[in-house]
Amino acid sequence: MQNQCFFRDTPTKTSLLVFRQTERLIQNQPYASLIETLSVGVEDKAGDMNKNTNDIIGWIGSTMFALCALPQCIKAWQTKSMTDFSWIFISMWLIGEILSFVYVFNVNSRSGKWQYPLLTNYVLNFILLSYLIFVKIAY
């Protein structure tokens, strides 16, 4: 029995066009420009209005993520207990925060486009997580 292939044996005109445009983009642009081109962000011909809206959404989302550990910090401060949190969870959270911060910092420094909401999120989360680790060890 012959193997059935769900894809065409020959590329279509559209797929060749996309491939050639992608190839030109990679060959002609410096690395930083490529990162900037592929970076997350919504910008179109509307310009600053769209960018400002995106920045506001980014700041609100990052602030919410950064402060989501605050209720747990307050509870840990009041009860002087972190028995419900496992070391595996805390370790994975800490490693994730550090690696994500390093990744975003490296990408931002190469592209020159700083994503302050993300960096602020990771720094605040690290501070709150450090307090939770202190409570877990001390009490």
Image (tube, rainbow, N blue to C red):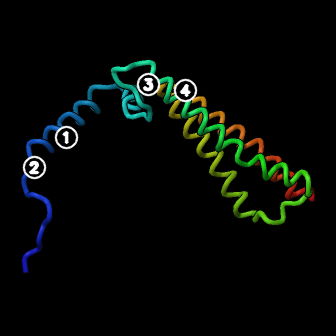
Residue shown at 39% from the left, 26% from the top: 43
Task: Look at the numbered discs 1 and 2 and tell me whether their residues touch, using CB distance below 8 Å.
Answer: yes
Query: Mark 3 Cα within 10 Å, few/some/many (few <14, many 20+)?
Result: some
Residue 21: where, in percent of width, then height? 20, 33
Label 4 SS: loop
Query: Mark 4 Cα within 10 Å, few/some/many (few <14, many 20+)?
Result: some
- Say which quadrant the N terminus sits in: bottom left
Q: Which residue is mark 4?
A: 114
Give the distance between the C-alpha atoms of the residues marked 1 and 3, in whole angstroms: 29 Å
Say which label, 3 or 2, has the lower sequence index: 2
4 sits to left or right of 86: left
Amino acid type, label 1:
Phe
On screen, 36 above or below 6? above
Say which label, 1 or 4, has the lower sequence index: 1
Q: Tell me the number on the disc at residue 78.
A: none
- Say which quadrant the C terminus sits in: bottom right
Task: Look at the numbered discs 4 and 3 and tell me whether their residues touch, using CB distance below 8 Å.
Answer: no
Say which label, 2 or 4, has the lower sequence index: 2
Q: Which residue is mark 1?
A: 19
